[in-house]
Image: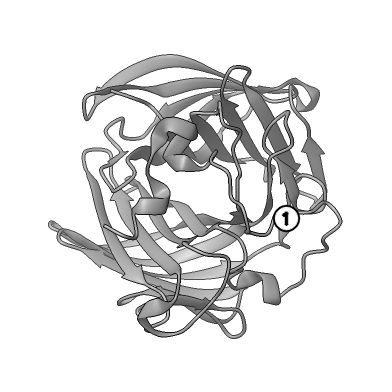
Amino acid sequence: MLLAAPLTGLAQGFAGLGSRAEGFALPSPDRVLQFPADHGAHPAFRIEWWYLTANMTGPDGTPYGLQWTLFRSALAPEDGQGWGAPQLWMGHAAVTTPTAHHVTERLARGGIGQAGVTAAPFAAWIDDWSLTGPDFDHLRLTASGPDFAYDVNLQARGPLVLHGQNGYSVKSAQGQASHYYSQPAFALSGTLRLAEGEVKVTGSAWLDREWSSQPLAQDQTGWDWFSLSFDSGDKLMGFVLRGADDYTSATWIGADGTVTSFKDGAFEARPLTWHNVAGRSVPVGWQVRLPIRGVDVTLRAVNPDAWMATSVPYWEGPVTLTGSHDGVGYLEMTGYGE
């Protein structure tokens, strides 16, 4: 499968993301992100994604999770038209309930209108799945699979957040990096369609934007990524890149709008409980700490079986938070073997 080809090959980092990328553009700490242009695609870079997760509740208080991701991967550092265009696209959509995890995948070629992204007005699509709006603050999200569908509206309730050094996010001691920003404060409302019927949901969503050409070091085999929304209104993004020496980074997003980035070593994540899913042992309970901000929380998966059985498999699902701060969040874990 052509689309999967650049995303497979685990010999050099998870999904080949640690492999060399000759000819492709590299992130620069001197680059100033520009909006709305940077909401669109960056075909000179090898890898890119538009990644939305949401914590929601139904009328009876049942918790739900939602994911929508559009990945772009390039065979060559250029754009193009028609079947010869080197841009390949993959979409993932999922809904998680306390007792079920629904997931589906779409694959597409660029250049023929099957998938793509435009910056203004914003539109990201693959087949009939779409994330669209007059701007990045007001969006409608739709997707469907064999056993689920959703149609939700998103309204931004805060500014964009630039991670790392003004959006330049370092991923290893060797200097691999990406350009990375988020809209972590969408208010969400809409409808889930499940086998048992329609469910009206409300909640909050977090959208990540990231692009690079070699975001991992060769010895890094996967990551644990956390987006946490506390009842206090504060938020925390943190990740651990697993390798010979783990590498961490974090961003504190205060309820007052202040943003503080933390370099390697400040953020801590320790597995507490493990669960067997899809023939793999995966940590679904965690202790997460950011001591400088007094954060010491325990994360528990809403559904430990939230396995993404896609071309590149991984775990992705909603979590609850207790401890120094209560709240909800999302957890993504990649690179866990058999």
Label 1 element class? strand
At x 72% / y 55%, what residue is drawn?
161
- Quarter the C terminus occupies: top left
At x 39% / y 15%, what residue is drawn?
273
On screen, residue 74 above or below 270: below
Is residue 300 visible to the viewer in this orientation of the structure? yes
Q: Position of residue 165 (x, y in %)?
A: 82, 47
Quadrant of res 238 = top right
On screen, residue 329 above or below 121: above
Tell which of 138 and 117 is nearer to you: 117
Quadrant of res 144 = bottom left
Q: Is residue 106 left or right of residue 256?
A: left
On screen, residue 188 above or below 305: below
Tell which of 235 and 167 is nearer to you: 167
| Residue on which the image places disc 1 | 161
Q: Position of residue 194 (x, y in %)?
A: 19, 59
> Which three-letter amino acid code belongs to the residue tagged 1?
Val
- Quarter the N terminus occupies: bottom left
- Within 10 Å of disc 1 (Cα), the crowding (few <14, some 14-19, many 20+) is many
Residue lying farthest to the front in this orientation:
22
